[in-house]
C-alpha cells in the first residue's frame, strides 16, 4: 500500500451559492419546499433569480464544502468536480484552492455555465436550495484519477452526485479505485428528496461500496422507508462499517457494529444559517477518523465544525476551524 | 420644469467586489497601500487574486452603493454604469435592481469583462481596494440619457469615474443636462489618490458644475493641496452650494455659505469593515436633502446609514435602512 498524500478526496457537484434572505411568504408564493434542495432548469433559475433579493455569492457544493472545512481543520484534502471556464468557475477554483485544497479537475470549455445554487435563507436560519447543475453534468469517469483516489485515506462522495447522469460512473469508478487500493469509501445521503430519487441505487451502494455513511434522521428514514428513527438505525447497522447519523440540535449517533455512541450537539450562541451544517459535520468527523481518533471524538469534531458554520451566513467556515477546535478541547 | 421621477440618479463604475480577510503582513508583502483604492491591470488582478484568501462576492461600485443605500432608505434612485454580459455583469444588474434601483444602461457585449475590485479587509476594519476597471472603460456619453437626468432631483457622480477615459464626457454631459433642467449636481471626491490623479479637473468641476460636494478630510486637503483641514474648509466655502465633509469617528461638517453644522458620528457597537462608509453617508445625506430636510438632519441621516454599513462585511446595507432610521429617530 503506497503512502497516502491526502486524508480525504471529495467528489461532488462544483457549485457557486447565491445567498439571500427571503420571507416565508416568498417560499409559499413560489412553491419552494422549505429546507430541501430542488433541481431546477436554467429557465426556472433565471425566473427565480429575478425575484430574489440582492445576494452574496460564495463557493459551495456539498462535498466541496466538506473538503474546504477539512482543510480548515488542518486536514489534507483534494476535490474532484466540474466547473466551466467562466467567472463563477474561476471563483469556485480560486476559493477551494485558497482554502488549501488540491483541485485539478479540468474546466469545461464549452456547453452550459458553472452550476449555481440559489439559497433562500429564512429568519429561522433554514435554507431552501434551488440548484441549476450547469457544467456539473459534464463530470465523468475520465475526471477520476485512480492514483489520486489511491493516495487518499478516504474517498468521500455526496449523494447529490447521483443527479447528473454521467457522474454515477465517476462515482462507481472512484469507489472501486479506493477499495482496490485498500482505502475506504464514504457517502453522504445529502437530502431526503435525493434519497427518494435514487433509493435503489443508494441501498445497493451502501450494501456494496460504502464504509462510512453520513445521513440525517430524515435521510436514513427515507433510505429504508421507515417511519421512525430507531427502525432505520437497526436497518443500517451491519450494512456499512460506520454510520454517522445527525439529528440537528439533538447531536449525532454513531453506529459501528456493536458499538453505539450518542453524542450531544455543541452549544451555538445564535443559529444564523444552517446551510452547510451536514457538510461541516462530515468534515469534522472524517478529520478525526483519518487521524486515528475514536468514534465519539470524531462525532464531537463534527459537531464543533458544524456549530461554527451555522453561526454565520454561508456554508464554509469563517474562523479557521483548527482554532475553533483548540478553544473547545 | 417637469415632474421628478427620481430623487437621485447616480453615475459610476459598475463593479463587483471580492472581499476577503487579509493580514497586515500580506499588504506589506504585496506593496498594497492600506485604506486606498489602486487601479490595476488584468494581469496584476489575476496575480493578486491567486494569492487572496477565499472570498465573498457582492455588488459594489461607489455611486452604485450610494444609490442602493438611498433605495434602502425609501428613496427613488436610478443608476448609470457599464457591465459586460458575463456572470459578474448579471450579478451586478440583479443586485441593484433587487435593491429597487432603476438600471437600464446597455451591457457591453464584447471586449473586457465586468469590473472587479479585490478588497482586502484587515482586522482593524480598514479596506484596501485593488480595482480592475474592465467594462467600465466603455461607459460613454451615449449611455447618459438627458431625460433620465432631468427626471432626477440630483445627479450624483463619483470621482472614480474620472479614471476611465471616455467617462469624463459622460460625466460632463450629465452635469450639463442636470443644470439645463434646473436640477442639482453632486460629486464625491472618492479617494485622495483619485484627487491627485485628477486635481485640476476636479477643481474646475467643483467651481463650475458641482452644487453638493462630498469629501473626507484627506480628499479635501488633497484637492486644495493644504496641510490642515481648516484651510481646506475655508477654501471650499463659496465654491459650491453645499460641502459635506466627513471625518470618520469625528462625524461630519456641513458648509453652505455662512451656514456651518458640526454633526457627531452615530454610535456603532463594532466596526467590522469600513468598505462603503462614504458611499452610505452620501446616500443618507442625499435622501434627506432631496426630501426637504435641513442640512444638520441630512448629515445625521448620512451618519446613520454609514453606521449600518460599517457594522458588517460588505458595502451595501444588510438591514433595510428605513428601519434603522426609524429606530434612531
Image (spheres, coloured by chain):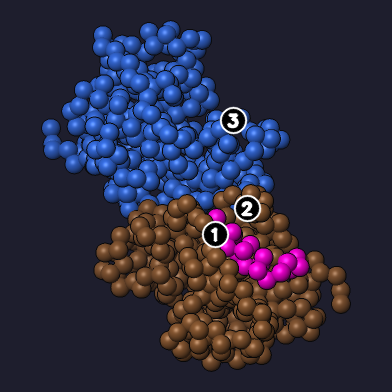
Chain colours: A brown, B blue
What kind of secondary structure does the magenta stretch mostly adopt? Answer: helix
Position of residue A238 measured from the top left corner of the image (x, y, whole percent): 64, 88
Q: Secondary structure at mark 1?
A: loop
Q: Is residue B301 left or right of residue A237?
A: left
Which quadrant of the structure image shows residue B324? Answer: top left
In the picture, the disc for residue A328 is 2
Q: CA distance from mark 3 to mark 1?
A: 38 Å
In the picture, the disc for residue B34 is 3
Chain letter of the residue beneath label 3 in the structure image: B
The answer to whether tags 3 and 1 share a subunit is no
> What residue is rendered at 53% in x and 45% in y?
B19
Residue A208 in magenta?
A: no
Mark 2 surroundings: few (<14), some (14-19) or many (≥20) residues within 10 A? few
> What residue is rendered at 13% in x and 32% in y?
B1
Q: Nearer the viewer, residue B157 or B214?
A: B214
Give the mark nearest the N terminus, 2 or 1: 1
Position of residue A278 measured from the top left corner of the image (x, y, whole percent): 54, 68
Above or below residue B225? Residue A292 is below
Q: Is residue B176 left or right of residue A111?
A: left
Q: Is residue B32 left or right of residue A228?
A: right
What range of the chain is rendered magenta? A290-308
Q: Secondary structure at mark 3?
A: loop
The answer to whether tags 3 and 2 share a subunit is no
Chain letter of the residue beneath label 2 in the structure image: A
Contact flag, marks 2 and 1 (Cβ < 8 Å): yes
In the picture, the disc for residue A266 is 1
> What residue is rendered at 45% in x and 19% in y?
B217
Amino acid at each position: 500500500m503506497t503512502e497516502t498524500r491526502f486524508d480525504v478526496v471529495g467528489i461532488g457537484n462544483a457549485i457557486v451559492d447565491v445567498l439571500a434572505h427571503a420571507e416565508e411568504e416568498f417560499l409559499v408564493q413560489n412553491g419552494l419546499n422549505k429546507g430541501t434542495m430542488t433541481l431546477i432548469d436554467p429557465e426556472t433559475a433565471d425566473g427565480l433569480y429575478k425575484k430574489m433579493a440582492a445576494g452574496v455569492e460564495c463557493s459551495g457544493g456539498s462535498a466541496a464544502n466538506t473538503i474546504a472545512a477539512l482543510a480548515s481543520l488542518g486536514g489534507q484534502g483534494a476535490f474532484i468536480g466540474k466547473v466551466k471556464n467562466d467567472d463563477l468557475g474561476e471563483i469556485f477554483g480560486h476559493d477551494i484552492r485558497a482554502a488549501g485544497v488540491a483541485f485539478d479537475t479540468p474546466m469545461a470549455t464549452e456547453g452550459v455555465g458553472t452550476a449555481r445554487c440559489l439559497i433562500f435563507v429564512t429568519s429561522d436560519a433554514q435554507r431552501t436550495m434551488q440548484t441549476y447543475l450547469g457544467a456539473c453534468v459534464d463530470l465523468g469517469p475520465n475526471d477520476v484519477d485512480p492514483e489520486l483516489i489511491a493516495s487518499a485515506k478516504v474517498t468521500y462522495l455526496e449523494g447529490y452526485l447521483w443527479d447528473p447522469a454521467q457522474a454515477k460512473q465517476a462515482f462507481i469508478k472512484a469507489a472501486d479505485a479506493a477499495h482496490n487500493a485498500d482505502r475506504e469509501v464514504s457517502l453522504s445521503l445529502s437530502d431526503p428528496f435525493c434519497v427518494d430519487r435514487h433509493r435503489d441505487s443508494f441501498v445497493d451502494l451502501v450494501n456494496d461500496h460504502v464504509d462510512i455513511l453520513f445521513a440525517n434522521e430524515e435521510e436514513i428514514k427515507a433510505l429504508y422507508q421507515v417511519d421512525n428513527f430507531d427502525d432505520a438505525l437497526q436497518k443500517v447497522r451491519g450494512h456499512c462499517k460506520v454510520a454517522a447519523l445527525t439529528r440537528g440540535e439533538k447531536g449525532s449517533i454513531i453506529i459501528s457494529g456493536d458499538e453505539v455512541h450518542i453524542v450531544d450537539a455543541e452549544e451555538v450562541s445564535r443559529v444564523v444559517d444552517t446551510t452547510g451544517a451536514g457538510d461541516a459535520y462530515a468534515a469534522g468527523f472524517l478529520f478525526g477518523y483519518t487521524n486515528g481518533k475514536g468514534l465519539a471524538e470524531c462525532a464531537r469534531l463534527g459537531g464543533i465544525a458544524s456549530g461554527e458554520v451555522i453561526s454565520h451566513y454561508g456554508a464554509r467556515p469563517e474562523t479557521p476551524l483548527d482554532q475553533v477546535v483548540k478553544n473547545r478541547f
